Amino acid sequence: MWQNIRIILQWEYIHRVRSKAFILSIILPFIILALAIGPQMLAMKSGPEPEYLVLISNDDALADTIENTFSRKYRLENDEPRYLFTRQSPKTETEKDTLIHQIIRQGISDAVLTVHLAASDTILSEIYYENMGPEHINRIQSGLQDAAESYRMDKAGLNRDVLAFIQTPVKLIEYQLTESGVLSGQNILIRYMTPFVFMFVLIMGIITTSQSIISSIIEERTHKIVELLLSSVKPSEIMAGKILGMGLLGLTQIFIYMIILYQVGNHYLSDQLTSGLMNTGHLIWYFVFFILGYLMFSTIYVALGSLFDNERDAQQLGGILSLIALLPIYFISFMLEHPESSLSAILSYIPLITPLLMIARIGISTPSFWSILGMALYLVIWIVFLIWLSSRIFRLAVLMYGKRPTFQEILRLTVHFPGNVTKCVRSNSGNVILNIG
Amino acid sequence: MLKLEKVTKHFEKVCAVQDVSFQVERGSVYGLLGPNGAGKTTTIRMIMNIIRPDSGTIRIGNGKTGAVNSRNLGYLPEERGLYQKRKIREVIQFFGQLKGLSPKEAAEHCDTWLDRFGMGDQADRKISELSKGNQQKIQFIVASVSFPDLLILDEPFTGLDPVNQIILKDIIREFRDEGKTIVLSTHQMDQVEQLCDHICLINKGRVVLEGALAAIKEEHGDQQIEVRFRSGPGKIPPGLFESYHIQNKILRGYLPESLPFKEAVRRLTDAYDIDGIARYTPSLEDIFIKLVEV
């Protein structure tokens, strides 16, 4: 039995791991991530060139304060000022309008900033530009606010040092008391981040490999290979081989993700944070629930693939199931607030979301060892049950070329345990007749 | 080698196979015949333990089906298919290993078989790149990769050109000569006549004819007659033949059980200008059509 499972596992794994779909499934999440945050990062990252601004102000002291504030607050990577100002002093409003249009049209400067000190020290400011990103506008807005505060403090005769002293932030140092000891500061961050990394990878794994799993089963149905397989191996061996093959594929995927994330972490995060992420005490449990979660979804996808004889129909339902994998994300905020609540515990018992919620619970709260082990066994029982059920659906469905079993037929199959093998024929009336042993 | 005793299989109200019994001797080629929907494939699937009978027993060698080492069983199903995106070599070795061959054995057997079919240089091509006929050859190789003791072939000649049909027939004969047993299910009666020693004809789930091919032909040839007329015979008097057909002044037909051959010859020569009369040995197809029509 194990020999056949191993051969099928190997067959599935080697073919899938070399497929373009798998390579794409590894690269795709990072491409999506890069596309999602890349432009924003680029926009936020300072460009090598400073921005040129023309400043028009009716008050020289205010203009000086603005220049000083911007120069102090915004610097380029080479420590040069990010914003370089040129002052202009038009005599009339008409002259100002003409000047602004001229500067912008001829590209003399990136923008024109007008600052008007009105009665009661009210500051009215306008900015004119042709092309300027929102991040610059936000910075200029913030810089103007700081400059206005400085100007008004000077005018009111307030001591800046005294104000800085008053505004000194209060430092709150957190300590979390757990069974394994006291965690503080960065360790708490690590403790919270690790499960999210695992959850993200698991969800991505489920979404990206669901298609491969369904295709694998449907290939055998549509190309009529099943009968040949069944003449050598049992349906349960086929199912187990496929599911374990896919599980191994999932592990390969997580392994590659982990290496990439570790390398990225090494580059962008502190050494302490990166090594902390990889050495969390619950890492083994995260792996256990990751594998169980992967197997759970693989089993369901295999059963789904057995029910359909074309990929399009199966993918539709598979897509909905993938969304179920995302469900725990909606509960996370609640669990963060109430990690030990009854609802959190109850949600953990829904098998499709158990793996993800358990990863989150272990990270957020501190369930007892026995409670975690119990949930792992609970999932194993579900997986074994689903393999059993799937192999029956598989055997029923695979012999029904060109016909999908109805819900009633599946129900009958599962309710009446088929000690005998199932088979269907088409009667004279065109109905499919099932024998469920 | 293979023995079925009163095997019955129902699919709810439909009886697919009813009390089917036959025995296949080691080192023989056995023909399993029948019209479409007769129950042949169901019978084969039960032999292969893909489905189980409601009652009756199936024994292969000394053991019940299901307990037999799959290495000793080869099966070419009627519903054919292979992994289209995989290489020929990979597919053959995969099924070889599922049959219990070691990876090394599977590789060796794969090469032997591909060379036999003149496809040794194509081992690394994908299945989808092959013609239908070549895919059929690979399908046969997959069925027989382990050189099984019992090989069940369901319509093995479909899709093969005459040259490859000859190669396949030679291989089947070789298998037989090596003491292996072949069950051949086909509609091509001429192939059955060329290859099979014994046959079993199933119709509507029941065995209607079983035994040695030569004996069956002899038994069904007693009342068959071929008459060559010199000129068109005109109207044939009723009662002389049970059934007949005339083509190019040659009549082939069945005499009634009550009419002895000699008496029939006398009546025919008295009534017609006859060129010759002979007992006609029926083809298997004639017997098949006659029994199935009845």
Image (cartoon, coloured by chain):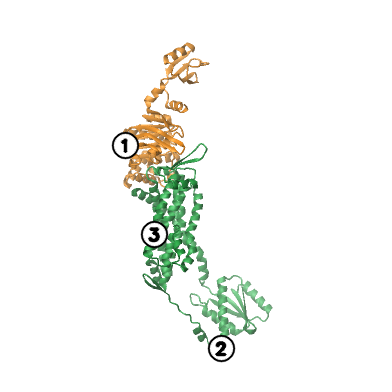
Chain colours: A green, B orange
Q: Which residue is mark 1?
A: B61
Q: Position of residue B86 (x, y in %)?
A: 42, 47
**Amino acid type, label 1:** Gly
Residue density around tag 3, few if under 14, some if 14–19, many if 20 or more, within 10 Å: many
**Amino acid type, label 3:** Ala
- Closest to the camera, between mark 2 and mark 1, is 1
Chain of the residue that carries numbered disc 1 in the rendered image: B
Measure how far apart labels 3 and 1 are at the Cα level. Answer: 46 Å
SS for callout 3: helix
Q: Which residue is mark 3?
A: A376
Measure how far apart labels 2 and 1 are at the Cα level. Answer: 110 Å
Chain of the residue that carries numbered disc 2 in the rendered image: A
The one nearer the camera, A105 or B226, is B226
Q: Which residue is mark 2?
A: A157
Q: Earlier in the sequence, mark 3 or mark 2?
A: 2
| Contact (Cβ within 8 Å) of mark 3 with mark 1 | no
Q: Position of residue A265 (x, y in %)?
A: 42, 67
